């Protein structure tokens, strides 16, 4: 099956790789959320659903229900809120592949918000570079092109 993506096409395999990478970005900032709400497993459950979808164990609709992790954002503020949004965006990749950038951008915002004001820019760039190191070769060019084209819509966090 081929997915139409902003006028182009995306193979199922690459769609799933985008979801895995988005989940990796979100998981990287779990400690920020967990520090704010100890014992709250909504984000971990959501990412588990994302992984189940990438393995073909559940449908896109079932995975999308886990995007309700966004509700976790209502219970926190600052960096933890951005971490919850990163997770919700990662799970939403099952429905709309372009949410991969939302997951990455919110994860960068979470790191920035968890850092002192003087270190935010450096921390954000470090997180952006870490995310890029996690990119599978098969989708690297696609994601880097998305970041270049949509950086303005993502708070310019991909300037790293």
Image (spheres, helix red, strand yellow):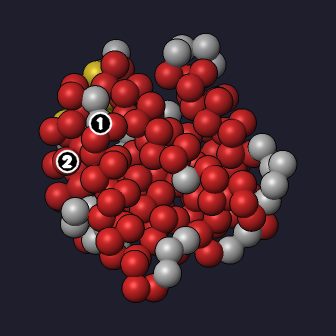
Q: Quadrant of residue 45?
A: top right
Among the two numbered marks 1 and 2 on one chain, the one whose residue lies closer to the N terminus: 1
Query: Is label 2 in a helix, a strand or a loop?
Result: helix
Q: Residue at x 67, y 58 (%)?
A: 33
Horizontally, residue 30 falls left or right of residue 158, namely: right
Residue 131 pos. (x, y %): 34, 47
Tell me what residue is drawn at x 61 percent, y 50 percent. Answer: 30
Q: Does residue 40 sit above or below 121 in this rendering? A: above
Is label 1 in a helix, a strand or a loop?
loop
The residue sitting at 15% across, 39% down in the picture is: 141
* Residue placed most toward the observer, 131 or 57: 131
The number of numbered discs placed on residues in the rendered structure image is: 2
Q: Position of residue 98 (x, y in %)?
A: 36, 46
Query: Is disc 1 in contact with disc 2, using a CB cutoff of under 8 Å?
Result: yes
Q: Residue 5, image x and y in percent?
A: 28, 39
Quarter of the image for residue 38 reads bottom right
Viewer-nearest residue: 119 or 72: 119
Q: Say if residue 66 shows up in the picture.
A: no
Q: Which residue in the protein does label 2 denote?
A: 144
Q: CA distance from mark 1 to mark 2?
A: 9 Å
Instruction: From the viewer's perspective, tell me whether residue 10 is left or right of residue 90.
Output: left
Look at the image and tell me in which quarter the N terminus lies.
Answer: top left
Most foreground residue, 153 or 79: 79
> Which is in the foreground here, disc 1 or disc 2?
1
Q: Quadrant of the C terminus?
A: bottom left
The answer, for residue 13, to whether it is visible in the render is yes
For residue 135, which numbered disc appears in the image? 1
């Amino acid at each position: 099956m081929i997915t139409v993506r902003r006028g182009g096409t995306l193979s199922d395999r690459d769609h799933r790789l985008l979801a895995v990478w988005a989940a990796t970005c979100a998981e990287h900032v779990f400690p920020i959320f967990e520090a704010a709400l100890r014992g709250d497993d909504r984000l971990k459950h959501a990412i588990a659903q994302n992984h189940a979808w990438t393995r073909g164990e559940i449908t896109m609709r079932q995975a999308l229900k886990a995007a309700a992790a966004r509700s976790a954002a209502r219970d926190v503020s600052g960096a933890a809120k951005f971490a919850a949004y990163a997770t919700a965006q990662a799970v939403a990749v099952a429905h709309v592949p372009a949410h991969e950038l939302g997951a990455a951008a919110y994860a960068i915002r979470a790191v920035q918000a968890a850092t002192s004001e003087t270190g935010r820019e450096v921390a954000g760039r470090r997180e952006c570079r870490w995310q890029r190191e996690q990119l599978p070769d098969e989708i690297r060019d696609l994601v880097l092109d998305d970041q270049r084209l949509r950086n303005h819509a993502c708070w310019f966090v991909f300037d790293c």
